[in-house]
Amino acid sequence: MRLVLIGDGESPHLLKWARALAAVPGLELWAASSRGFAPGFDAVLAADRRLALNTRPDVAGGNLALLWQLPRLARWLRRLQPDWLNAHYLTSHGTLAWLAQRLFRVPGKLVGSAWGSDILVTPTKGVFWRWLTTRVLRACAFITSDSQVMASRMRDLGARDVMVFPFGLDALPPAATTKDRDLVFANRGLEPIYDPERVLQVFAGLARQRPSLRLVMANDGTMRSALQARVQQSGLAGSVRFVGRLDGDAQAQLYDQAQWYLSLPRSDSVSVSVLEAMAHGCVPILSDLPANRELVRDGDNGLILPDGALAQAVDMDRLLQRARTIADDNRAWVRRHALFAPAVAAFVDRLRAFPSR
């Protein structure tokens, strides 16, 4: 069975999909990227099985340069004669794959993989974006979603068949042996959608309860300078540390050390970062989003902060008393539901169950 990934080859998320798919016996994998390819692809997929369109698409839209590459992509796909096109991020790469089939008669079935804002945000921008999303969804034999809430939204928009599994972990990490009860970790992007200002507000409230607390904020983004200035002005400079983007090993060390994990985005599907924190035994404190409630039972295996709530709702002592139980329960859930390789194997089984073209 010949499958072509279509997405952003510079994204670590597409690389993770490629690694998992390449490990499935009997699957012949190819990939087309709207940009280039991350170096990690060299160990996964030979250069002659890849096509880099070398554009710089913007998820906000207006990607005419990408559409100009459509004939080139279609010619390449027609030579391959794929069984499946797997488009990642529906309102860019999904549109590209749909047009390649509709305008250039590229063979194979289309399966879409939604990533979050392509379903939760883009269709709300206007009539055109909703129409486009619906057309792409209806063109897909089925769609993958990493949360039930996003699957429900896709069905509302016209998806015929949705397969739900988290964008999970490659492996369950060893259980953390010791935790620093005063360490809080946050690693979402420093962009408005992830609301890092609220992360600082919540941390400040927690620190009033427990003055020994420290916050490590990883990752980067357009708000970093403003956030650092705010920390200086608020008197938190001694308690908050910005460490930028981290490699996997450095991030795993912080997950292992931190007792608390803060993730407070305004919109999100099931986040791999939250799954990682759960697997490493952190107590998650999350924003009140439907996808977060698929992972955390408020007050049981973590905490959900309602909109507008800062830290007054957080009973840190009670959570600390149950921290070991929370860690064990969350690791067990990740082991059962959020390991990526078994999910991808089931995904390929679904592809093979469809009638041949």
Image: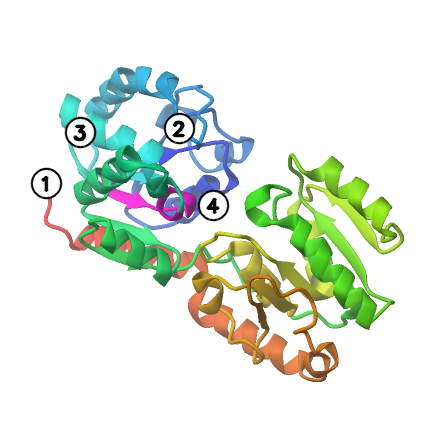
Badge number at residue 101: 3
With respect to residue 187, does 69 lie above or below? above
Q: Earlier in the sequence, mark 1 or mark 2?
A: 2
**Amino acid on which the number 3 mark rests in the picture:** Gln
Q: Secondary structure at mark 4?
A: helix
Q: Residue at x 76, y 44 (%)?
A: 243
Badge number at residue 357: 1
Q: What amino acid type is highlighted by mark number 2?
A: Gly
Residue drawn at (72%, 50%), measured in percent from left and top? 217
User: At which x and y percent is residue 236?
Assistant: 85, 53
**Residue of label 4:** 16
Left or right: 123, with 157 as reference point:
right
In terms of sequence position, does the residue under pointer 3 or pointer 4 come before the other? 4
Closer to us: mark 1 or mark 2? Answer: 2
Q: Nearer the viewer, residue 205 or 177?
A: 205
The question of residue 263 being in magenta is answered with no
Please, what secondary structure does the residue beneath circle 3 have?
helix
Image location of residue 284, percent across then percent down: 61, 67
Pinpoint residue 173: horizontal percent, then vertical percent: 60, 63
Specify the quadrant that holds the C terminus: top left
Q: Which residues are magenta?
A: 110-120
